[in-house]
Amino acid sequence: MHFALEVDEDETKLVKRLDELRAAHPRAFRTHEGAEVAVGLDAEHRFVKQELDKLQEEFPDALSVGEGAEVAVGLVPENRNIQKQFEELERRYPEAFAEHFGEVSDETCAQALRLGRQVYIGEGCWHCHSQFIRPVSNESLRWGSVAASEEYDNELQKPVLFGTRRVGPDLSRQGGRHGHDWHAVHLFEPTWTSPGSPMPSYPWFFDGSPEKPNRRGLALITYLQWLGSWLDEYPYYEEFDEVKGGQY
């Protein structure tokens, strides 16, 4: 749940209280179009919401709290990697992007991420791809750093898509490993990028060609590029790709 806050600048006492709350819980706040937006973070968010409710009762004429701000929890704010990927997606497919998402913004990126996750689930991608790197069998040598619990504390990991098996690779570090073109071609016809791949093709994500992804195709690519975008080193697989020639 998200709450847009509008504050009367003359209420210095209220602003001070909000600044203190924001300093104590920095992950729960971001700035959007001049207003403070509190974004949900489970238990921390509930505490912040309770404090905001108290402030609203104390300053009813100076603080308005309204639900519905379209900023995804922990997805876009302060994540420059996914912002960059979304901007590049718009430049690569300008007509399709304009038709299906309009302009680049935190809100449209959040919409694409949510839809992309829905598509990922609906198409059963989690049947063949895991999203959890275990501290066993040297998995970190192939897929990247071992999964940490804090990675799963956001909206797109509720519930966590650990997967059931690995017919294909683990995808929890997929973001930035391949470009948008590669993902488009791979989804349209997997064997064109990975000869011998057992992955089925998904032509319904496109309007007849991998050059023309539709809304679902753009959303799924955005979601795949989001996976691992929170890592300090991005893309994680740059060196791995160079050695392996981009093949799984």
Image: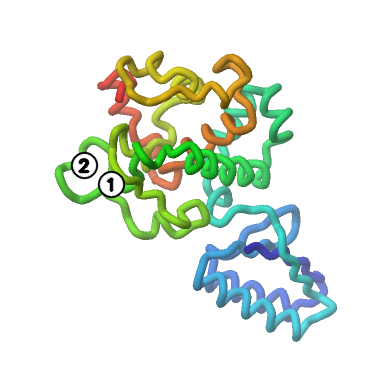
Residue 63 drawn above or below residue 242: below
Residue 11 placement (x, y as % from top left): 79, 77
Horizontal arrangement in the rendering, residue 4 relative to residue 124 (left or right): right
Which amino acid type is marked by label 1?
Ile
- Tell me the number on the disc at residue 64: none
Looking at the image, which is closer to me, 89 or 185?
A: 185
Residue 24 drawn above or below residue 33: below
Q: CA distance from mark 2 to mark 1?
A: 6 Å
Of the residues under marks 2 and 1, which one precedes in the sequence?
1
Of the 4 image quadrants, the one containing the C terminus is top left
Give the farthest residue toward the left.
Answer: 137
Give the farthest residue toward the right.
Answer: 61
Q: Are marks 2 and 1 in contact (CB under 8 Å)?
A: yes
The residue at the point 60 percent across, 53 percent down is 72
Looking at the image, which is closer to me, 127 or 114?
A: 127
The residue at the point 40 percent across, 38 percent down is 234
Residue 154 drawn above or below residue 42: above
Which secondary structure lies at badge 2? helix
Of the 4 image quadrants, the one containing the N terminus is bottom right
- Tell me the number on the disc at residue 139: 2
Residue 205 drawn above or below residue 58: above
User: Splitting the image into 4 quarters, where does residue 83 fall?
Assistant: top right
Residue with the mark numbered 1: 133
Which secondary structure lies at badge 1? loop
Residue 192 placement (x, y as % from top left): 40, 13
Which amino acid type is marked by label 2?
Glu
The residue at the point 30 percent across, 17 percent down is 196
User: Splitting the image into 4 quarters, where does residue 91 fall?
Assistant: top right
Horizontal arrangement in the rendering, residue 143 relative to residue 6 (left or right): left
